[in-house]
Image: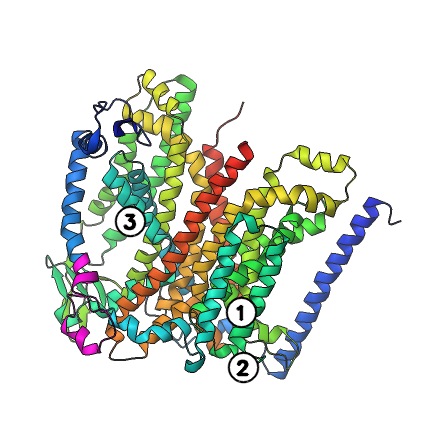
Amino acid sequence: MFRSERARNILYQVLLLAAVVGVGWYLVGNTLHNLETRNIQSGFGFLGREAGFEIAERHVAYDPSDSYARALWVGIVNTLFVAAAGIAIATVIGTLIGIARLSTNWLLATLASAYVEVMRNVPLLLQLFVWYGVFTELLPSVREAIEVGGWLFISQRGFRFAWPAPHVGWTVAAWALVAGAVLAGVWRAYARRVQMATGRQLPVGTVSAALVLGLPVLGWLVSGAPTAIEIPVLEGFDFQGGHVLSPEFTALLLGLSTYTAAFIAEVVRAGILAVDKGQTEAGMALGLTPGQRLRLVTLPQALRVIIPPMTSQYLNLTKNSSLAVAIGYPDLVSVTNTTMNQTGQAIEAIAILMAVYLSISLAISLFMNWYNDRVRLVER
Amino acid sequence: MANGSMTPPVATLGAPRAPRAGGPLGWARTHLFSTPGDTVITLLTLAILLYIVPKALDWLLFSAVWGRQPVAACDAVRGEGACWAVVWEKFRFMMFGVYPFDQQWRPALAIVVLCGLLVVSAFKAFWRPLLAAIWIAGVAVTFWLMGGGLGLAPVRTEQWGGLPVTLILAIFGIGFAFPLGILLALGRRSSLPIIRSLSVVYIEVVRGVPLITVLFMASVMFALLLPEGMRIEQLLRAQVAIILFVAAYLAEAVRGGLQAVPKGQYEAAEALGLPYWKMMGLIILPQALKISIPPIVNSFISLFKDTSLVVIIGLYDFAYAVKKSVETDFSWKKYFIEAFLFSILVYWIFCYAMSKYSQWLEKDLARGTHR
């Protein structure tokens, strides 16, 4: 029987599976026994209990009397918020630096290289410590806040700036912006189909701009055109009014985006270098304008090379946002850590933590794979 | 040959071709002032540099306080010069953490041994079975120096700290993750469905979560997973977590190498009638590993930086020792920037050297295959 390769293969696999299950069984058994002797109840029942701790920064309503589930949700939203903002800023800085590294201007290229070599060779955690230290120790106290133009106040309590007073008009405008972006996408797809079918070119740029800019303005006008701006005022021990970026959030955002930008710069550089020079020349020979050449010839080919490594950089940034716990930004890891310490439900808390990160990673991968499929070279 | 013949990486067609001239002037014309736009960029950048660099140099070097000096010397130039005296003052704590003071020659020697291991591994001449023996000896000596025994006073791992801990976590992390990573990569490429799916699930789950969650798990859950009464030290827990974490990344690096080995090599090995392990060990892996060395070195660089995350579970690695050294001393606390800059410099030297090595190695290995 052992002479048959098939039989052997099945035997090996069964043995491995048995070993994995056996070890798992042993560990679970130990855990159940330990939980019993320590009198810890397992299960997710704790999620419904009152959390009882304050979360300093949040984008959804939360009160210490809310449940642990709600607190974790606040953490998830905070993580997603800082990751999304970080991805946007890192992409912009990284692209600029990647292009600068390829510049024929020696000074610019050298400075860009220096940036990349310094940023990516220093642990992110130390960079966060430095940013956070600068924002909390070296900036002046609230009373001596640095004032910029009467609308921005920089102090140890963060960056507080003038912000439109709450009004339904702003909410309408924000949603109109989202609607405008979606409609612009639909219009672009339609224009492409028309061009494919008839060769007729519909105006994409102007219509998109009109939709993205016009709809919010229209929504703002229709819903009362609010113009009141809240200027921060020093009252007692802190400023009141306006909008504030806390030192924790600012340090995390700056640290994450400047660090990841160094990696993105390398990705962008490699992508641009991968496009053959003959492609640009062919575009010129066809009489395309520089803008058309970039949009129709260079970028689509560069993007094909750029997207897969860019995806892993976005994933890295999202995972690295978990370093927030070291400087006290209430992201998912911080909130979970507090929950774990208060309830003792370590296994459940870590399971939730991992499940959330896995889902985020999976969602970003799926989206980028979908996008990658769209820009992929259609092979004949 | 004149400098003007050096072609810039990307030539923008349509831009006026710069006149070819030798000497520094010609170089400046092609590399700094080739177009009006270029000139504007150069002048702007120069202006910014002229504003920042003298100030930065003054703060970092000329007005700074160097050497072993009291904190009052730093307070006198606060804001104008850096206080490098903090590095002198806290050097022993930054480097060795809470290791017994009179025994600190031992971790110092351990740093030398560990760096020696790295340097030896970097030479291609040592890429032979001998290297494994050197590693085993290096590991043994390190643990003897750090932990004591055989004539040295024993020091518990709770007291280990500073740079040796960072080096141990990174070097042993990659060393032990390496075989595990190879097994996982082979498993992922295997034709046996159960083995393949177990490997895929492990690799993808670990790569989908941040290192912190794995460290948390090790720090909190190991106590629950093990039989009652059995305890593992915090350092070992973190080490195991790092090994399990890095193995998934190494597996992907090795898989890249396995995929790059031409299919004919597999077929030739099968045609010779070699069984699976002989085929892998004698034909495929030697080629695959050579291809995957550069990504493995890159994994090591990220791991070296990532070891700083053990700060979060309270382990005294180099980053935490530096942080604690200034945080716990009120009079020096305000010079934390200088302390962090020092640690940044140390990490940077290690990582930059390794990344340069990796780039050189990549070119060197590529040349080998083209011959």
Considering only vertical position in the picture, is A215 above or below B90? Answer: above
Q: Is residue A367 visible?
A: yes
Residue A167 occupies quadrant: bottom left
Q: Is residue B69 magenta?
A: yes
State the separation of the CA atoms marked 2 and 3.
65 Å
> For the C terminus of chain B, which image quadrant?
top right
Residue type at mark 1 is Thr
Q: Position of residue B156 (x, y in %)?
A: 52, 80
Q: What residue did someone put label 3 on?
A: A174
Q: Earlier in the sequence, mark 2 or mark 1?
A: 1
**Dot 3: element:** helix
Is disc 2 in contact with disc 1, using a CB cutoff of under 8 Å? Answer: no
| SS class, disc 1 | helix
**Of the residues shown, which amino acid type is indicated by label 3?**
Ala
For the residue marked with disc 2, what is the amino acid? Pro
* Residue A31, horizontal then vertical, whole percent: 64, 74
Residue that extends furthest to the right in the rendered view of this protein? A1
Frontmost residue, A40 versus B242: B242
Given contact means CB atoms under 8 Å apart, are the residues at marks 2 and 3 in contact? no
The chain to which mark 3 is attached is A
Write down the residue under mark 2.
B154
- The foreground one among A193 and A75 is A75
Front residue (pair A117, A378): A117
Colour option used? rainbow
The residue carrying mark 1 is B142
